[in-house]
Image (spheres, rainbow, N blue to C red):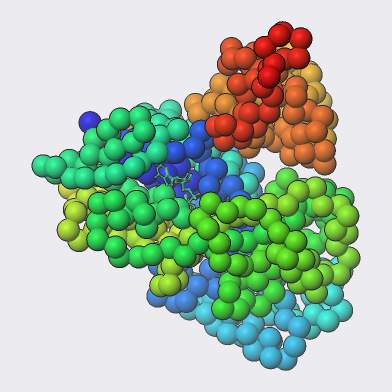
């Protein structure tokens, strides 16, 4: 039996796992997919927001401000790609200038540091490629960009080193409570735990209702994106937002931590599992984006993707212990700024568990740092040393991103090992470049088969069942 079961291995569940790993608590993370970070956490704008947007007094405002600071600390400690590049909210009219003033006041009330409004001249000096129509901007220098899936992975990996268990490919199908013990029914048997943290993303309302009365409902809402080649990555220096409206923060144009440009999202009601992209959605994104930055060359698009928001009509995080079922904590409604807030939310979840009776004795020797060898960022001397130690670091597999065989092999043997081509991509960027794995994909597939000692045909592209080949042509077994 576990002390705590966390349902969902996105940024929310992984943050809770990381914080719980610091205590003598037997914790398990239950995830229906074959890897961490494959829900909304892998498909969003990747911005660590400043905190000027949420309404004062909301949980979003509180945790965004705390999370903005804590994320920076954690990314440094856990070697997660992060850059504090600041954001600009751009106004195109006198009317929108008033919105900037409102955001400035709201930001000050929320405690956002160093906010200021720039006039057109300053805006153009700092962002030469911004539209001539832009008349002013709110500058929020505390905003950052992050690799969201690497952030979740880093916290998950460290938590595993501190004793937290991860049960992947394990879907929660029902929950009941008998004699103060939660019985969590899954496709892999019943898991028992004293406490449950529901971090199931767009399915958090369904998981809550497996055991409790309905208290919130998620109306999933999809956002579509363009990811552009590195040729577009320096078009802007900041995260460029337009003025927010009732549908959300609007279409942004931003560099990514990996040197690309991200453009999106739109906002449309969708099914919880609908991550398809559409002509209408992408056309909308494109039309809006060129209003801010007219020079984006959309022929340099290397990928489109979509993510689904866990929207509720309360438009705030739903973080509370169930009134009747003590020990069941919901962490629902984690729409934006959920990525920016999750690490701060997790610290409070631990406090809530403690207040609810969980014994929280701090562990003596915990792992609280992580280092990843990223070949392309090393000096010649560092590269030579690494190759001498392990010749696999001397073999480039992904030429677009300069990723070595050593990094791929490492990704397959980390505390939460990659088991698919996309899982390798999320850990070391192989396949993230211009050709999107067209050249290195088959080689990564071979390395996975060799290292995990499984047939080539059993290597999935991403989720279970996304196999690429059915067999080899000359072995007589192909169908
Ligand atoms: C278009 C878009 C843009 C966004 N941009 C930003 C941004 O720039 N900055 C920001 O701060 N936030 C942003 N967000 C919000 C942010 O992405 C989310 O708040 C965050 O990723 C939510 O993480 P999560 O762990 O709660 O959910 P998820 O990442 O979805 O994780 C939930 C996990 O639970 C698992 N699960 C579900 N049901 C079950 C079950 N029955 N059994 C087992 N496992 C289950 C799922 O498989 C999934 O892995 C954006 C969101 C979207 C959609």
Residue at 80% in and 80% down:
134
Task: State the image coordinates of residue 183 (x, y, percent, origin top left).
Answer: 23, 39
Residue 456, visible in the rendered structure: yes
> Is 69 placed left or right of 361 in the picture?
right
- For the residue pair 192 and 96, the one nearer the viewer reads as 192
Image quarter of residue 334: bottom left
Residue 377, visible in the rendered structure: no
Q: Residue furthest bottom?
A: 94
Task: State the image coordinates of residue 365 (x, y, percent, origin top left).
Answer: 36, 29
- For the residue pair 458 and 359, the one nearer the viewer reads as 458
Q: Is residue 335 above or below residue 392?
A: below
> Is 245 placed left or right of 438 in the picture?
left
> Is 93 placed left or right of 177 in the picture?
right
**What number of labels is visible?**
0
- For the residue pair 79 and 454, the one nearer the viewer reads as 454
Task: Tell me the quadrant of the picture where the C terminus can be found.
Answer: top right
Residue at 57% in and 28% down:
418
Task: State the image coordinates of residue 451 (x, y, percent, origin top left).
Answer: 61, 15
Q: Is residue 139 above or below residue 161?
A: below
> Is 156 placed left or right of 354 in the picture?
right
Task: Tell me the quadrant of the picture where the N terminus can be found.
Answer: top left
Residue at 30% in and 65% down:
215
Q: Residue furthest top?
A: 475
Residue at 80% in and 33% down:
438
- For the residue pair 31 and 16, the one nearer the viewer reads as 31
Task: State the image coordinates of residue 37 (x, y, percent, origin top left).
Answer: 53, 42
Q: Is residue 320 above or below residue 391?
A: below
Q: Residue furthest front?
A: 479
């Amino acid at each position: 039996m576990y002390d705590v079961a966390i349902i969902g291995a996105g940024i929310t569940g992984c943050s809770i796992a990381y914080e719980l790993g610091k205590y003598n608590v037997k914790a398990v993370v239950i995830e229906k997919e074959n890897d961490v970070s494959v829900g909304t956490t892998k498909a969003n704008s990747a911005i660590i927001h400043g905190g000027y947007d949420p309404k004062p007094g909301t949980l979003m405002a509180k945790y965004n401000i705390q999370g903005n600071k804590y994320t920076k600390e954690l990314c440094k400690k856990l070697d997660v790609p992060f850059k504090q590049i600041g954001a600009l909210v751009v106004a195109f009219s006198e009317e929108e200038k008033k919105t900037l003033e409102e955001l400035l006041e709201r930001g000050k009330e929320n405690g956002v540091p160093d906010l200021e409004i720039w006039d057109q001249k300053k805006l153009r000096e700092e962002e030469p490629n911004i539209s001539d129509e832009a008349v002013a901007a709110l500058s929020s220098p505390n905003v950052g960009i992050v690799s969201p899936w690497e952030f979740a992975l880093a916290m998950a990996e460290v938590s595993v080193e501190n004793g937290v268990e991860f049960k992947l490919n394990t879907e929660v199908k029902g929950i009941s409570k008998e004699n103060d013990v939660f019985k969590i029914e899954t496709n892999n048997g019943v898991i028992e735990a004293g406490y449950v943290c529901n971090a199931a993303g767009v399915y958090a309302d369904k998981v809550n209702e497996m055991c409790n009365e309905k208290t919130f409902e998620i109306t999933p809402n999809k956002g579509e994106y363009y990811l552009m080649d590195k040729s577009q990555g320096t078009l802007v220096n900041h995260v460029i937002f337009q003025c927010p409206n009732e549908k959300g923060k609007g279409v942004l144009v931003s560099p990514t931590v990996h040197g690309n440009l991200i453009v999106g999202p739109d906002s449309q009601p969708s099914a919880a599992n609908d991550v398809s992209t559409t002509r209408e959605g992408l056309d909308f994104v494109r039309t809006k984006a060129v209003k801010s930055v007219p020079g984006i060359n959309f022929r340099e698009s290397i990928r489109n993707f979509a993510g689904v928001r866990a929207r509720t009509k309360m438009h705030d995080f739903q973080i509370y212990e169930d009134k009747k079922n003590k020990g069941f904590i919901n962490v629902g409604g984690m729409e934006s700024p959920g990525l920016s807030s999750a690490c701060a939310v997790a610290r409070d979840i631990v406090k809530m568990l403690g207040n609810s009776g969980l014994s929280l004795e701090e562990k003596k020797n915990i792992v609280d740092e992580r280092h990843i060898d990223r070949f392309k960022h090393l000096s010649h001397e560092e590269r030579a040393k690494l190759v001498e130690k392990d010749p696999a670091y001397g073999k480039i597999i992904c030429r677009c991103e300069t990723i070595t065989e050593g990094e791929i092999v490492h990704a397959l043997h980390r505390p939460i090992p990659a088991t698919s081509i996309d899982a390798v991509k999320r850990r070391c960027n192989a396949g993230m470049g211009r050709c999107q794995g067209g050249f290195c994909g088959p080689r990564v597939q071979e390395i996975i088969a060799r290292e995990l000692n499984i047939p080539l045909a059993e290597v999935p592209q991403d989720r279970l069942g996304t196999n690429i080949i059915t067999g080899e042509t000359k072995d007589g077994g192909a169908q």
